[in-house]
Amino acid sequence: MPNEQAPTLSISKGTQPAVAAAGRWQVNALADPATMRALRNALQTLPKDAGTWDLTQVTGLDHIGAQLFWNAWGKSRPRRLALAPEHEEVFQRIEQSGALTLPPPEKRPWYSLRGISLLLHDFSGHLVSFVGLIGQLALDLGTFVRRPLRGPWKEISAHIFHIGYQALGITALVGFLIGVVLSYLSAQQLHTFGGDIYLVNILGMSIVRELGPLLAAILVAGRSGSAITAQLGVMRVTEELDAMLVMGMPHGFRLIMPRVLALAVSMPLLVVWTDAIALLGGMAAAKLELGLSATYFLQELPAAVPLPNYWIGLGKGVVFGCLIALVACHFGLRIKPNTESLGQGTTLSVVTAITVVILADAVFAIVFKGVGF
Amino acid sequence: MAQPIIRIRDLRTQFDQFVIHQDLNLEVQQGEILSLVGGSGSGKTTLLRQMLGLERPTRGRVEVFGEDIHEVGGVQLRRLRNRWGMLFQHGALFSALTALDNVAQPMRELGALPEDLIRDAALLKLDMVGITPKDAQKMPSDLSGGMVKRVALARALALEPELLFLDEPTAGLDPDLSESFVSLIRSLHQQMRLTVVMVTHDLDTLFALSTKIAVLAEKRVIALGPPQEVIALPHSFIQRFFLGERGQRALEVLRDKEMEPNHGK
């Protein structure tokens, strides 16, 4: 059964080369790799000007099969062609549509003048709209302060729950492990110098001033930054953003400000939490590795880490939180209504948020270089 | 009579406590354009999804091309799926691919056809639905709603299906576009000898295209037959659905159509 249906070509060579096709020239039959390979080989060995084509034995023909013939003919009807009447229509359809060719793609290397100007334009577009976002946020905060009762309290508290409370588990786990790792590493080094008791200073300073805020920020950027971008992106896809504008609900006041405020509130709290758990991890490892008791650790800590470091840590938390929220909102609002853009926007948002956080951390390090030691 | 293309036997669909279909029977013959109509929530789209094998009925058989699509699997199901095409309500084009690649994708998926043949065949399909090669290179997000539907139709037709499913083919199109879409489907139906099953609310489309209408009400098919016969039935839903003011207007199309007896062959 399949054999008599498979599309075949028989070529009789001679003074008048003739090609006879038979079988079912339909996509389901052509989709068999072996059949297709045999047909292509046969068509390639065909003399340039094959005289006669006999298609009367073809039992089934669809547009794909017909297109295969058409391409073999060099996109014109051969002079001597025998065709079953019911297949005439298909070839007429192909002939009618004429030569369909794709316009050549525009090739432009990235370093061409146009490419560079496009890159610059793109970058400045991001910069301008980010500055615009900050400006809008300032205006919205002004409105909020003037009429606090009409503010989006519900949204703020919901976001604090999602961004802050639900991140407690993951920040605790990562913080604890980093504390353990740091404690083990420094304990071994300090032990060789006999400076075991300085472990409290190293752990306290690095965690409270640097690692706590940075760890929390990186986790929140990955966790909530991506979520914010995706949320806003999906709202763009489903036209919710447009619906809000139409009903007179400004994006800045109802979407961006609550998220920024929620992150600004929950980030410092998460920083304190991460600090505490990481110190706990460090303390546990110090007890195991060096035999430093927890009481000694806690007694020494206030002396080893002056108070300004806590404030710097908290300040970092607030700034990082605002930056993450702003970056996430910025990319979320720029997402175009298609899936490709949603994926790209979310990735870009997380990468940018983490980069911006580390950048801000460097600025903190420079600005407060003489404070807290 | 020849074997029906689709045969649904004693179908029952139940979501939790909600019974949507009960003892539902339906047959679609080769070459028909069958419209499924019914009130909202009567399970038209669910029925369509069950015919496509996207949803499984609670009980009963759904046979397409003589095979129970909820029993067959693997290669056989894939071969079956290559024999039908589906036009989704919102097009469901792959947004990461250009219009051309969207149409070429089902052919590429076969893994045997040469690339130049795929490109030419895809361009031909797009030309059949009135999309120029220039527009073929655009991304779906850059196309208008009507063009998205046309490209989606070209994609549904890519593998030369014998059976075409349409979910609300003219929803969201303006009257002019709807009109041309209807005549496009009609001409493709004749050119490619398709069997068409569609779900539509649009009475104009319904009367302009259907050779048969199946009315879904009371959890089953209460009427199945040519449009003239169905609207003559005295059931209250049918009376409300077809013979309201909108229905009367659309019916004029049907009367005009009787003048040209050729259609639907």
Image (spheres, coloured by chain):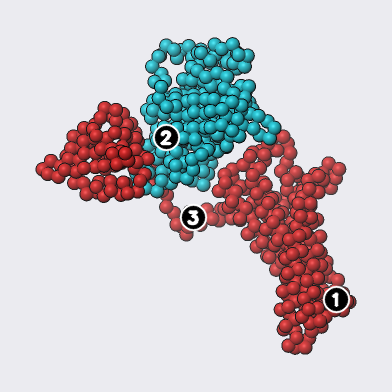
- The residue lying at 82 percent from left, 45 percent from top is A153
Q: Residue at x 24, y 42 (%)?
A: A9
- Front-lying residue, A331 or A130: A331
Distance Cα–Cα, label 2 vs label 1:
75 Å
Give left or right: position of A269 versus B214: right
Callouts 2 and 1 in the same chain: no
Chain coloured red? A
Mark carried by residue A365 = none
**The residue tagged with tag 3: helix, strand or loop?**
helix
From the image, which quarter does the N terminus of chain A lie in?
top left
Callout 1: helix, strand or loop?
helix
Per the image, the residue denoted by label 2 is B161
Residue highlighted by disc 3: A115
Quickly name the residue at label 1: A294
Q: Position of residue B204 (x, y in %)?
A: 52, 20
Location of residue B29 by image quarter: top left
Q: CA distance from mark 1 to mark 3?
A: 61 Å
Q: Earlier in the sequence, mark 1 or mark 3?
A: 3
| Chain at tag 1 | A
Q: Colour of chain B?
A: cyan
- Residue at position x 86%, y 71% from top? A307
The C terminus of chain A - image quarter: bottom right
Is residue A160 depicted above or below B14 in this figure?
below
Q: Amino acid at mark 2?
A: Pro
- Disc 2 vs disc 3: which is toward the camera? 2
Q: Is residue A90 above or below residue B115?
A: above
Q: Secondary structure at mark 2?
A: loop
